[in-house]
Image (cartoon, rainbow, N blue to C red):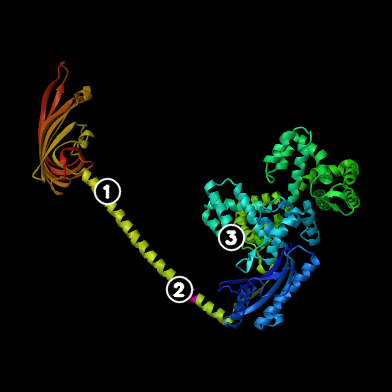
């Protein structure tokens, strides 16, 4: 039964704009769809939903034409056809559809024909690739994508390869499931631009990288959900930026960038698959270890280097000598085709010979001219391989094994090559420092695309420049856009604000900018005021806390004293209070506190140093001291300044054995003093006092006779005198009492 298949053309009403540095206008999009019957080019309003779609597009175009705020700057009509059918007929049909749509616009808007651009886009291979990449049900998916890469510049050969591969299984499936959609062009984007095929492939590659990454499972699940559910690329990028921690997002950027520019090609994948099959079927030594490396080591993680290291290179040498030739001569792969003048050969073999030929031509290998002549003249691949081994005694063939064989395993995909080109362009257009640009571009021009180039870039400034590349340039690879009208049949028009509208928009923008600045200044002032209030509050709280701490320390030292015990450091230091000559004298005093401001101190001192002086004499002294004090500070605390009245009585005896002479007597004195008591803790304190008064002394001078065996003391003469005596006292005090509440 014949199916009715129809073709469509998408209508894109694209609201574009021109902007200066200071103004911008929101983009808007209107999209409609026109369906064409199979093999027809006339616009049929009665077919399917054409009437509604045409009315929408024409109505919007007329409205914009009549609006003085806008100017229609460009109208483009593009015609396409699905890849099935003859190429010549599809090109003719696509052109007729574009012309038909153009005249429909003229007839329903009054717009002159010369204002409408027509584009014959031919067969919609771009749409087919996008649909294949997005589907997991396409038979022989990898082979179809490989044909699209391999024969991108030769549509005749591309179509033939896809049609007859594997019994036309994939082609028939796409004819049923994809081609009707390609003819109708359904599912167009709601914007003037859409992701390019390159960007779509890059996003797909990012998903693969995320799946194999070491990020925590929760974060990885959220990232995959964004990639699977969010269709807008810019929103997708922003959600990823917000979702991932800063460190995780930076790592995702760098890993993705590395994966995009070093993605292995289908050719290298096929070569590795062929090598594995041949090794598995061989009897080579260490076969299982070799297969383990191929199965476990990812392609871009030095799979070939690990094989070179295995058992000092013995397995790798066997592969080069016995299995490598199969890549150039094999007849056993499934995707065979007849190549003119070459007999039966695989597309893999042909591709390898073609790749090898280009690498040899660009090299300085020995016997280069002979090898290229052989490849160009000898069509029998098996004979070509044997003759190649004979050139220069096998030197040329060994060079190919050592140098070019690894290259066949690591050929870069067209997508990776394109990514490197995009990176180069983005670097040139970026605002990176010129010195950094020069270093990056120098590496990209001096190293081949692939892991070596990536490693050289990563090494710049300890990885800092690579971080810039991933941060600044990666979005360009993922958000690369191409004009929407190029993706399928359709008609579109672009319009921009009129000069008057631009002026109004600029004025409004300026007004809005000034309003925002004023609001920002007001907000900043409020913030500054709040900050000053907060700082003042914090300072006050700090001062209050310091005061509280001081008061707590003071409170901890407050005591209501009743009794004190003290000793004078001046006596212990060997200085008499009046600074007369003396020796250290034990002393102790007690002080009684009463009447809230008064105290009475009684002290005594005593020294008898015959044991120390021995044959040299004697020093003996004793004294009593009574002092009445009045305290000038806080009541009940007895601290700070005080005034005192004192009286002293004592006696002494000093002998000089060398004379031998001595003197003895009594003394009394009275005076006044002023002092300061400083608490050290609650019970301990330190007192400093200065005294001044009158002292009266009665002296008796005597001689000592020791010639009779027993010492006899004979009074020599007497003396009485009075004198003014200053004193300094330094007392360590321990007070008894109760805490002051």
Helix, strand or loop under label 3: loop
**What residue is disc 2 on?**
515
Considering the whole magenta stretch, tell me its main secondary structure.
helix
In this orientation, does residue 307 appear? yes
**Residue 194 percent location from the top left of the image:** 64, 65
Mark 2, Cα crowd under 10 Å, few <14 / some 14-19 / many 20+, is few
Does label 3 or label 1 sit earlier along the sequence?
3
**Residue 37 percent location from the top left of the image:** 71, 70
Q: Point out which mark residue 549 bears.
A: 1
Helix, strand or loop under label 1: helix
Q: Quadrant of residue 424?
A: bottom right
Q: Nearer the viewer, mark 3 or mark 1?
A: 3
**What residue is disc 3 on?**
231
Q: Residue at x 67, y 79 (%)?
A: 105
Magenta-tinted stretch: 510-517
In this orientation, does residue 698 appear? no
Q: Is residue 603 left or right of residue 535?
A: left
Q: Is residue 700 left or right of residue 729?
A: left
């Amino acid at each position: 039964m014949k199916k009715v298949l129809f073709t469509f053309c998408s209508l894109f009403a694209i609201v574009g704009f021109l902007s200066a540095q200071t103004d911008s206008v929101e983009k808007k999009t209107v999209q409609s769809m026109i369906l064409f019957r199979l093999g027809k080019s006339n616009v049929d309003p009665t077919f399917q939903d054409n009437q509604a779609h045409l009315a929408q597009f024409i109505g919007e175009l007329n409205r914009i034409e009549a609006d003085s705020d806008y100017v229609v700057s460009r109208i483009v009509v593009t015609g396409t056809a699905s890849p099935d059918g003859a190429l010549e007929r599809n090109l003719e049909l696509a052109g007729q559809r574009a012309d038909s749509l153009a005249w429909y616009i003229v007839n329903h808007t009054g717009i002159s024909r010369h204002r409408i651009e027509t584009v014959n886009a031919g067969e919609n291979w771009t749409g087919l690739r996008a649909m294949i990449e997005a589907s997991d049900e396409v038979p022989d998916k990898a082979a179809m994508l490989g044909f699209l890469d391999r024969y991108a510049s030769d549509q005749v050969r591309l179509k033939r390869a896809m049609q007859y591969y594997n019994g036309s299984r994939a082609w028939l499936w796409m004819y049923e499931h994809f081609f009707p959609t390609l003819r109708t062009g359904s599912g167009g984007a709601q914007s003037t631009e859409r992701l390019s095929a390159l960007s779509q492939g890059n996003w797909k590659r990012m998903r693969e990288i995320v799946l194999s990454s070491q990020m925590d499972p929760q974060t990885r699940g959220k990232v995959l959900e964004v990639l699977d559910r969010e269709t807008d690329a810019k929103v997708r990028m922003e959600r990823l930026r917000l979702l991932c921690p800063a460190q995780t997002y930076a790592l995702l950027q760098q890993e993705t960038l590395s994966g995009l520019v070093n993605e292995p090609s289908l050719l290298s994948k096929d070569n590795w698959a062929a090598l594995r099959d041949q090794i598995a079927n061989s009897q080579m030594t260490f076969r299982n270890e070799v297969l383990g490396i191929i199965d476990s080591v990812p392609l871009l993680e030095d799979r070939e280097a690990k094989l070179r290291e295995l058992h000092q290179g013995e397995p790798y040498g066997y592969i080069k000598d016995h299995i490598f030739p199969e890549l150039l001569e094999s007849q056993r792969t499934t995707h065979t085709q007849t190549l003119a003048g070459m007999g039966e050969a695989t597309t893999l073999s042909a591709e390898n010979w073609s790749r090898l030929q280009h690498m040899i031509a660009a090299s300085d290998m020995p016997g280069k001219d002979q090898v290229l002549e052989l490849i160009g003249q000898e069509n029998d691949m098996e004979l070509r391989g044997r003759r190649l081994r004979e050139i220069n005694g096998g030197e040329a063939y060994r060079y190919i094994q050592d140098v070019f064989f690894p290259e066949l395993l690591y050929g870069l995909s067209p997508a990776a090559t394109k990514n490197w080109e995009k990176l180069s362009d983005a670097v040139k257009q970026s605002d990176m420092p010129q010195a950094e640009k020069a270093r990056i571009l120098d590496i990209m021009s001096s190293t081949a695309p692939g892991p070596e180039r990536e490693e050289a870039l990563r090494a710049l400034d300890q990885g800092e420049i690579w971080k810039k590349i991933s941060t600044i340039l990666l979005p360009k690879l993922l958000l690369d856009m191409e004009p929407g009208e190029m993706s399928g049949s359709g008609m579109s028009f672009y319009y921009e604000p009129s000069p008057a509208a631009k002026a109004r928009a600029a004025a409004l923008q300026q007004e809005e900018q000034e309003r925002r600045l004023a609001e920002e200044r007001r907000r900043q002032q409020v913030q500054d005021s709040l900050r000053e209030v907060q700082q003042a509050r914090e300072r006050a709280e700090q001062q209050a806390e310091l005061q509280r701490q001081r008061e707590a320390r003071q409170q901890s030292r407050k005591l209501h004293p009743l009794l004190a015990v003290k000793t004078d450091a001046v006596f212990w230091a060997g200085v008499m209070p009046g600074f007369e000559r003396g020796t250290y004298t034990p002393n102790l005093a007690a002080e009684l506190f009463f009447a809230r401001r008064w105290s009475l101190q009684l002290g005594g001192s005593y020294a008898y140093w015959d044991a120390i002086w021995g044959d040299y004499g004697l020093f003996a002294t004793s004294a009593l001291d009574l002092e009445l004090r009045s305290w000038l500070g806080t009541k009940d605390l007895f601290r700070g300044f005080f005034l005192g009245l004192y009286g002293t009585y004592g006696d002494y005896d000093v002998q000089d054995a060398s004379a031998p002479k001595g003197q003895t007597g009594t003394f009394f004195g009275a005076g006044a003093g002023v002092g300061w008591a400083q608490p050290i803790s609650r019970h301990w304190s330190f007192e400093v006092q200065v005294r001044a008064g009158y002292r009266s002394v009665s002296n008796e001078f005597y001689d000592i006779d020791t010639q009779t065996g027993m010492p006899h003391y004979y009074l020599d003469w007497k003396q009485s005198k009075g004198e003014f005596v200053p004193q300094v006292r330094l007392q360590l005090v321990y007070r008894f009492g109760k805490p002051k509440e």
